[in-house]
Amino acid sequence: MNRVIILLGPTGAGKTGVSLLLAQKLKTDIISADSMQIYRHMDIGTAKASAEERKHVSHHMIDIAEPWETFSTGKYIAAVKPILEHLCMEGKTPLVVGGTGLYIKAMTKGIFSGPSADWRLREELLAIEGESPGTLYDFLKKLDPPAVEKITPRDTRRLIRALEVCLKGDANMSELQQTLTRPLPYEFIKIGITRQRKELYRLIDERVDKMIEAGLVNEVKIVVNIIEEHYRRRDGEREMRDRDKHLPTSEKPVCLSLPSFQAIGYKEIVRYLQGEGSLSEAVTLIKKASKRYAKRQFTWFRKEENICWVDTTGITDPQEVFGKIHPVLTTMM
């Protein structure tokens, strides 16, 4: 059975730098397992490898969707399959790198096939929750009690998806989760990068500051303009005005309802640009959200089986991290 290496870990742990060195050492390509790096034009905020770095190592599953498009886990797996097959046929061992646990789980364990996204229904459910917090949790408790046990009352995104499945599909979420698709037919070698939590949070703070210095605010402006221009071309000015009746520019720009703008950093900067607080306050919110996300990633990956964790606390130079990870990987292969 062909092998696939997965390098995973929380945001800010240092995956990108060491992945480039590993790929060069193994003479292979990198496949991104990041649900936000798939979007074009969103480079700084999603911490993509630079154009120069991608000259030295081929990357896949980056810049494959427009920021107004929906890209499901099912689409990700469908796109990844031929890439893995091609690399293995070339005699390479693919290197998957990322922190989106659902993508990794779908590759290694399989996923269920639910109904496609219904954005009108999602907006209606979101409006209901906004008017009466807790309503969606109570609603799901009635429709699918086993599913609600796995979702916290404040996890609106997952509540909405579970309700969407119940209302639009032929079975509820908990039933579908019992009928997973098969995992991809590879031997997966999973290496996890971990750090002492205090150090990781410091590195996250530093990374956010560097993103701001690199031009994140201007990048957000550009992406917002691209999205608005897309809708103007698609709908025409009249339909655009009709759309904005329930999404006023001064309150909720259309971009904030898109999956791409769930990427940490983008929605916070949009709100700053709308006059909701200072840039300093937006940066603080980005840092807090990034740390919460890292904590959720740790929680998710703790449930993943057969991960060989490498503690890189105190090591920030990619070459030194590589020196610690490569011998471990060699023993696993």
Image (spheres, rainbow, N blue to C red):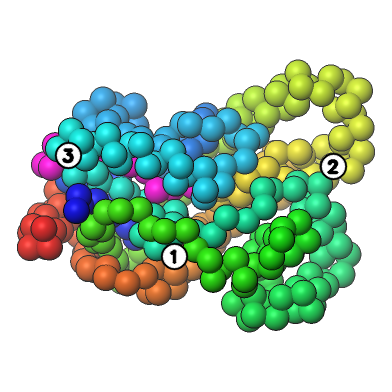
Relative image position of residue 192 (x, y in whole percent): 27, 63
Mark 3 and mark 2 in contact? Answer it, CB < 8 Å.
Answer: no
Quarter of the figure with the C terminus: bottom left
* Distance in Å between CA atoms under marks 3 and 2: 48 Å
Circle number at residue 297: 1
- Residue type of the residue flagged with mark 3: Lys
Circle number at residue 271: none
> Which element is circle 3 on?
loop
**Residue at horizontal 36 percent and vertical 63 percent from the top:** 200
Of callouts 1 and 2, which one flags the residue occurring earlier in the amino acid sequence? Answer: 2
> How many other residues sit within 10 Å of disc 3, few (<14), some (14-19) or many (≥20)?
some
> Which element is circle 2 on?
loop
**Residue at horizontal 79 percent and vertical 70 percent from the top:** 136
Which-is-in-front pick, marks 3 and 2? 3
> Which element is circle 1 on?
helix
Relative image position of residue 250 (x, y in whole percent): 83, 40
* Distance in Å between CA atoms under marks 1 and 2: 31 Å
Of callouts 3 and 2, which one flags the residue occurring earlier in the amino acid sequence? Answer: 3
Instruction: Please state which of residues 12 and 214 is positioned toward the viewer in this rendering.
Output: 12
Residue 193 position by quadrant: bottom left
Relative image position of residue 253 (x, y in whole percent): 77, 39
**Residue at horizontal 79 percent and vertical 79 percent from the top:** 142
Q: Is residue 84 visible?
A: yes
Residue 33 magenta-highlighted: yes
Establish if 72 lies above or below 42: below
Establish if 204 lies above or below 171: above
- Residue type of the residue flagged with mark 1: Gln
Relative image position of residue 137 (x, y in whole percent): 75, 74
Residue picked out by circle 3: 92
Residue picked out by circle 2: 247
Q: Which segment did they paint magenta?
A: 25-35
**Residue at horizontal 35 percent and vertical 53 percent from the top:** 184
